[in-house]
Image (cartoon, helix red, strand yellow):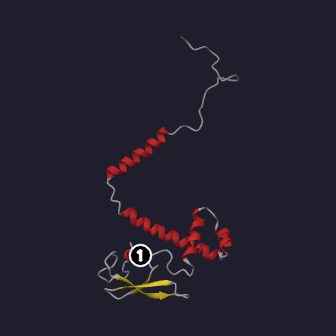
Amino acid sequence: MSELEQCFCPNEQCREYGLRRQGNIALRGKYGKDKSRDLRYCRICGKRFASTQSSALFGLHLSADTIRQIIHHAAEGVGVRATARLLELDKDTVNRVILRAGEHCAHVLSGLLTSLELTEAQLDELWTFVKKRKVLAVPKTLITSTGGRGSGRPSTRPRA
């Protein structure tokens, strides 16, 4: 599947707004400092837009590879300052990329969660599972009565 088929028109007034695989998106040219970024347009409304407009990468003046490295370091638990040193970037730039990626993930996740359409029965079953897991959990410490000092055995014999 081509990359153009995954794009959609970002113009809210366009009749093909938000629809993918309609054949209305085409490549218009290149833009940027070194002309390495794609410029796309909608054949219906004529709006031009960047290929990264609906992504976390839009508006950042870093290469896609650098942004991927920053996000990878953050996912591995590397700190912001350490990531900045490793990639030879400013710590504020690294922080900005991480925050933007987090906001984008939250936006995508909220859209996915609202489209689940769970029923009460499904939520009840989920809660039952969670509740049972707490009941079945093994206690951290076993409390035994030793009856005083000694080997831990009761001092009196059990009745037969």
- The three-letter code of the residue at mark 1 reads Glu
Tell me where residue 104 appears, x and y as whole percent: 48, 71
In the figure, residue 142 lies in which quadrant? Answer: top right
- Residue that extends furthest to the right in the rendered view of this protein: 149
Tally of marks: 1
From the viewer's perspective, is 83 left or right of 41?
Answer: right
- Quarter the N terminus occupies: bottom left
Tell me where residue 140 appears, x and y as whole percent: 58, 38
Pick whichever, 97 or 23, lies toward us.
23
From the viewer's perspective, is 20 left or right of 76?
Answer: left
Query: How many neighbours does mark 1 have within 10 angstroms: few (below 14), some (14-19), or many (20 or more)?
Result: few
Give the structural element (helix, strand or loop) at label 1: loop
- Residue that extends furthest to the front in the rendered view of this protein: 1
The residue at the point 43 percent across, 65 percent down is 109
Tell me where residue 88 appears, x and y as whole percent: 67, 75
- Residue that extends furthest to the left in the rendered view of this protein: 15
Pick whichever, 141 or 45, lies toward us.
45
Pick whichever, 135 or 25, lies toward us.
25
The residue at the point 68 percent across, 23 percent down is 148
The residue at the point 48 percent across, 42 percent down is 134
In the figure, residue 7 lies in which quadrant? Answer: bottom left
Q: In the rendered image of this protein, does residue 145 appear above or below residue 39?
A: above
From the viewer's perspective, is 55 left or right of 153?
Answer: left
Q: In the rendered image of this protein, does residue 135 appear above or below residue 106?
A: above
Residue position for label 1: 3
Tell me where residue 67 appears, x and y as whole percent: 56, 73
